[in-house]
Each structure stands twice: as C-alpha cells, then as structure tokens.
Image (cartoon, helix red, strand yellow):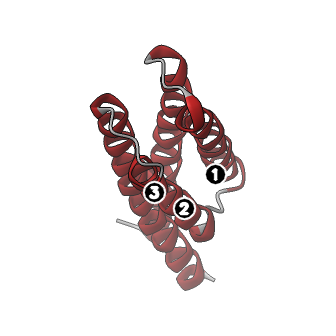
C-alpha cells in the first residue's frame, strides 16, 4: 500500500465521520421539536445541535475539497459531544427521554469526532512524511 492511498483512506475516514457527526447534530437540533423538549433544554438542544451540524459540515467540506482535515475542529466537536451528554445533568433535567437522547447522541458525536481526529493525525503524518 502506498502512502498516497493511506492519506486518501484517512481523509475519507475524516470526511465520513464529520458527515455523520453533522447528521447527529441535526438530530439533536430537531429533538427539541420532535420530542417536545421545552424550556432551557429545548433551546440548548436547538443551539448546540445547530453548532455541531455547522462545524461538522465545515470539517467534511474542508476535508473533501482541500484534503486538509483539522485536529482542532475534531477536538472541538468531541468537547461539544461531551457537553451534550453532560448538559441534562447540569440543567437538572429529570425526564428520561431527554437524558437518553442527549446521552446517546452526545456519546456518538464524541466517539465519531475522536475517530475523525485520529484520521486527521494520520493524514497529516502521511502528508508530512511524503514531503
């Protein structure tokens, strides 16, 4: 396997994980409407879900067009995923549906972002060794 194939494989990994993360961000955003999550938690899910969707979409676009994924963006998305998991507990929400939605979606966002960060590091290491 050549180094170019490894860099391409890593960038595809980053692009796909960022795309899935964007979809999950939209899910978190729409969960407030679909599952009638109200008050601060509803507003939180709309805002944070939209932020995750936009940042992850930018990461996917950046990787697809320029082939230069960012570890920093993946790290920010992982932190946002962890925040989504923790937010119902911080806000004192007791509704099990909200805790379940945020815990599951936030954990998957964090995991996908960490996988994307790994792919970003592989891409940058392969590119640096080629130069």
Question: Which of pointers 2 and 3 lies earlier in the amino acid sequence?
Answer: 2
Q: Give the residue drawn at x 38%, y 52%.
A: 89
Query: Is residue 85 found left or right of 78 in the rendered image?
Result: left
In the rendered image, the vertical position of residue 131 relative to residue 9, given as above or below: below
Question: Which of pointers 3 and 1 lies earlier in the amino acid sequence?
Answer: 1
Tag 2's secondary structure? helix
Q: Are marks 2 and 3 in contact (CB under 8 Å)?
A: yes
The residue under label 3 is: 113
Q: Quadrant of the N terminus?
A: bottom left
In the rendered image, the vertical position of residue 32 relative to residue 40, given as above or below: above
Q: Give the residue drawn at x 41%, y 55%.
A: 86
Instruction: From the top left corner, tell me how far across and down residue 72 is, in percent.
Output: 61, 70
Instruction: From the top left corner, tell me how far across and down residue 38 is, in percent.
Output: 53, 26
Alpha carbon distance from label 2 to label 1: 8 Å
In the rendered image, the vertical position of residue 101 relative to residue 60, given as above or below: above
Q: Which dot marks residue 43? A: none
Please identify the quarter of the rendering in which residue 3 is found. bottom left
Tag 3's secondary structure? helix
The residue under label 2 is: 74
Q: Give the residue drawn at x 47%, y 35%.
A: 24
* Circle 3 Cα neighbour tier, 10 Å, few/some/many (<14 / 14–19 / ≥20): many
Q: From this viewpoint, is residue 2 visible?
A: yes
The residue under label 1 is: 59
Tag 1's secondary structure? helix
Alpha carbon distance from label 3 to label 1: 10 Å
């Amino acid at each position: 396997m050549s180094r170019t194939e490894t860099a391409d494989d890593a960038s595809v990994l980053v692009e796909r994980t960022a795309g899935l993360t964007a979809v999950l961000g939209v899910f978190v955003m729409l969960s407030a409407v679909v599952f009638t999550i109200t008050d601060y938690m509803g507003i939180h899910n709309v805002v944070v879900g939209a932020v995750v969707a936009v940042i992850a979409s930018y990461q996917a676009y950046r990787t697809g067009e320029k082939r230069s994924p960012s570890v920093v963006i993946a790290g920010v998305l992982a932190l946002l995923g962890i925040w989504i998991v923790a937010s119902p507990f911080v806000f004192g929400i007791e509704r099990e549906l909200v805790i379940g939605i945020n815990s599951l979606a936030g954990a998957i966002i964090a995991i996908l972002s960490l996988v994307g960060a790994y792919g970003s590091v592989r891409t940058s290491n392969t590119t640096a060794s080629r130069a």
